[in-house]
Image (tube, helix red, strand yellow):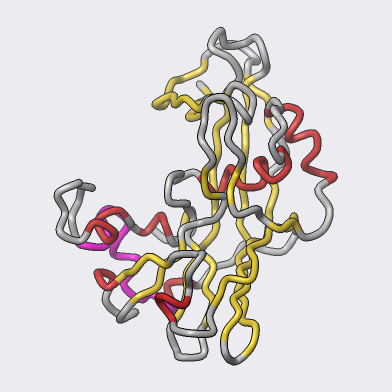
Amino acid sequence: MANWAFTRWRGLGGALALFVCVPLTFAGCTEETDDYRYRLTVEVETPDGLRSGSSVIEVETEIVRPGSNPAGSAVSWKVRGEAVAVDMPDGSTLFALLRSNNDVEWPARVVPMAIMRGRNLSWEQVYAELPRMDGVQRLPRNWPANAILPERSAYPMLVTFGDISDPTSVMEIDPDNLAATFGEGYALHRITVQITDDPVTTGIEERLGWLPEFYDKMLDGQRLNSIDAENRLANDLSQGAFSKGILQ
């Protein structure tokens, strides 16, 4: 059976390029790595004290051995997990999504990027270090720039809903200014990741009863993403931003 590579890096610190489902048919060209789980935790300062939420996310990874592909190393990911939900004192909920503002593969990349910390490492080096990643790792505000990529956010996208029963009421939250959304006294304290053996988190559909309906459409009900959409944020998000590999 062919193995599929979706993303290629020139080392993790280098240029990002995409394969669009290119089958790798070289005999013995792939190398399976151990699946891993990590706990993503978001802590928020509120007028009533610190509030937090967390979610355990699982990542299955397969890498292409160096030299088996003339274009360089490749990696494929499969993510299973849910967005983090943090309940606010006023009854609203902050969600840390399974993507960032500029990377829909953020949940698969965040732990390798936390290991890399600005170093230009190969996938083989990163996954060799992963078992030694001990304790809670606080995410920096941004991943550093390199020769190819500019400085970019290390945080997941944060959103809330004006009416949690209405997916079109989704609103993006500025991680540097939670007070603009929730009011005075609110601020993001920190976002962390930690390797864990805990089971994958499930049950987000109990909060978002409409979520199972959006596996094949955006939150504004449209089938396709469009720059001309009236509600750009709702048109940019679907079920996969909140849950992967769990809901049908």
Image location (x, y in percent) of residue 167: 28, 70
Q: Residue at x 76, y 29 (%)?
A: 125
Image location (x, y in percent) of residue 242: 44, 62
The image quarter in which residue 109 lies = top right
Image location (x, y in percent) of residue 179: 46, 77
Q: Residue at x 43, y 51 (%)?
A: 101
In the displayed structure, does residue 52 sit left or right of residue 89? Answer: right
**Does 64 sit above or below residue 171?**
above
In the displayed structure, does residue 211 sit left or right of residue 17? Answer: left
In the rendered view of the protein, which quadrant contains the C terminus? bottom left
Say which of 70 and 121 sits in front: 121
Image location (x, y in percent) of residue 12: 63, 30
Q: Residue at x 49, y 43 (%)?
A: 105
Say which of 122 and 142 sits in front: 142
The image quarter in which residue 116 lies = top right
Q: In the rendered structure, which segment of residues is drawn in magenta?
A: 207-220
Q: Main secondary structure of the magenta part?
A: loop
Q: Residue at x 74, y 56 (%)?
A: 137
**Does 19 sit above or below residue 177?**
above
Residue 210 magenta: yes
Tally of numbered discs: 0
The image quarter in which residue 51 lies = bottom right
**Does 35 sit above or below residue 220?**
above
Residue 46 magenta: no
